[in-house]
Image (spheres, rainbow, N blue to C red):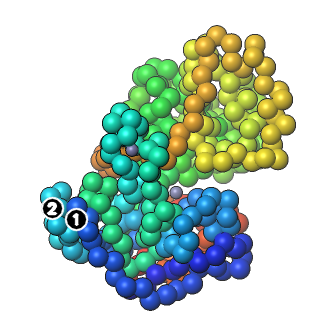
């Protein structure tokens, strides 16, 4: 099979992914072999390529995979040949530890990430445990469904972790790939909840999109909204929005950080953190890490029902380096997806 392989970390500008011929993997017990038709590209892959997130090299990247079941290993019961499935960042967890037993398999010490600890979807085929694959709703094309498996599912988890109740006010800090999906889920599930969106100054496109998607108030991080927020999600790589979210948070409210890393250069903002203004009166700060199967299983049908239709820009498998460079430069319209034939 053809695959784009990462053998060493390097800047994306150096085009480090190389097309190779690899043997088609064989599904083990309870595993399925998936013929990949689409795989989304993600900022996390920039981190893997450039060495900020350690991946097990050599590796085939890609954790937003859509394809069809090509063959099945022994004892497979969830799927049959030709079923359309999606695969997300969570590739496996032990199923036995205290985290797994409570449904927090995203925190399992043996957690394996797709396209990081094991080979992912920048290839014609991949294997996965049948318990870690999900049916894709009919209404999506393969390419449309791919971005839902990362930005969508993780956004869904972050929203779930806020404990938002219908009627309460939700704040979103940063309005990129994940936030623009979260606002659609929030508006669908919590019909009486106002959503306030905070962007960086000058992000007119993001602000306009937020308005179109139903934001009840749109401002800039640092602004004081008309009412305090009951909960908020921070989607940014910076610290300032976290401090600002805590400042405009209602008593007993919660801020969820939906980011894999925070930028070092902005950490002076943390010096502004005051116990009295930002944390006192039972305000909470929580982070969202990875996803669980529950998140993917609940989110995908919901995305079909709403419906959430991601805007995608398609590339060939061999163009993965170029697509990732465009992603790094912020030049992709919507979500980038590799179309694999
Ligand atoms: Zn991702
Ligand atoms: Zn476990």
The Cα atoms of the two marked residues, 1 and 2, are separated by 6 Å
Q: Nearer the viewer, residue 80 or 333?
A: 80
Reading the image, the residue beneath label 2 is 75
Q: Residues within 10 Å of mark 1 (few under 14, many from 20)?
A: few
**Where residue 291 appears, x then y in whole percent?**
44, 46
Reading the image, the residue beneath label 1 is 29
Q: Residues within 10 Å of mark 2 (few under 14, many from 20)?
A: few
**Where residue 83 appears, x then y in whole percent?**
21, 66
Q: Is residue 175 left or right of residue 82?
A: right
Q: Where residue 49 is drawn, which disc sits there?
A: none
Callout 1–callout 2 Cβ contact below 8 Å: yes
> Which image quarter holds the N terminus?
bottom left
> What residue is drawn where x is 44% and y is 70%?
119
Q: Note whether residue 41 is visible.
A: no
Q: Is residue 329 above or below residue 26?
A: above
Query: Which callout, 1 or 2, points at the residue further toward the start of the chain?
Result: 1
Q: Is residue 117 above or below residue 217?
A: below
**Where residue 206 appears, x then y in whole percent?**
64, 48
All told, the count of numbered labels is 2
Q: Nearer the viewer, residue 229 or 60?
A: 60
The residue most toward the top is 281
SS for callout 1: loop
């Amino acid at each position: 099979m053809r695959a784009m392989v990462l053998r060493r970390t390097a800047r994306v500008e150096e085009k480090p992914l190389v097309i190779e011929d690899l043997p088609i993997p064989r599904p083990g017990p309870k595993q399925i072999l998936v013929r990949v038709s689409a795989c989304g590209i993600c900022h996390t892959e920039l981190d893997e390529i450039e060495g900020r997130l350690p991946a097990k090299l050599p590796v085939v990247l890609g954790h937003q995979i859509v394809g069809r079941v090509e063959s099945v290993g022994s004892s497979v019961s969830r799927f049959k040949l030709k079923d359309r499935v999606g695969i997300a960042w969570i590739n496996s967890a032990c199923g036995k530890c205290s985290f797994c037993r409570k449904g927090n398999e995203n925190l399992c010490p043996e957690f394996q990430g797709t396209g990081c600890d094991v080979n992912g979807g920048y290839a014609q085929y991949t294997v996965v445990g049948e318990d870690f694959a999900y049916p894709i709703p009919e209404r999506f094309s393969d390419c449309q469904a791919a971005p839902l498996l990362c930005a969508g599912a993780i956004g869904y988890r972050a929203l779930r972790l806020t404990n938002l109740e219908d009627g309460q006010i939700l704040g979103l800090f940063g309005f990129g790939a994940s936030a623009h999906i979260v606002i659609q889920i929030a508006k669908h599930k919590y019909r009486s909840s106002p959503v306030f969106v905070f962007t960086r100054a000058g992000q007119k496109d993001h602000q306009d999109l937020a308005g179109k998607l139903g934001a009840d108030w749109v401002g800039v991080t640092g602004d004081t909204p008309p009412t305090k927020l009951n909960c908020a999600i921070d989607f940014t790589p910076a610290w300032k929005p976290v401090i600002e979210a805590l400042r405009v948070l209602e008593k007993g409210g919660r801020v969820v950080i939906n980011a894999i890393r925070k930028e070092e250069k902005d950490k002076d903002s943390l010096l502004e953190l005051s116990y009295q203004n930002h944390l006192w009166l039972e305000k909470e700060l929580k982070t969202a890490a990875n996803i669980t199967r529950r998140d993917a299983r609940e989110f995908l049908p919901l995305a079909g029902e709403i419906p959430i239709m991601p805007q995608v820009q398609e590339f060939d498998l061999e163009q993965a380096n170029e697509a990732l460079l465009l992603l790094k430069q912020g030049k992709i319209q919507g979500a980038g997806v590799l179309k694999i034939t």
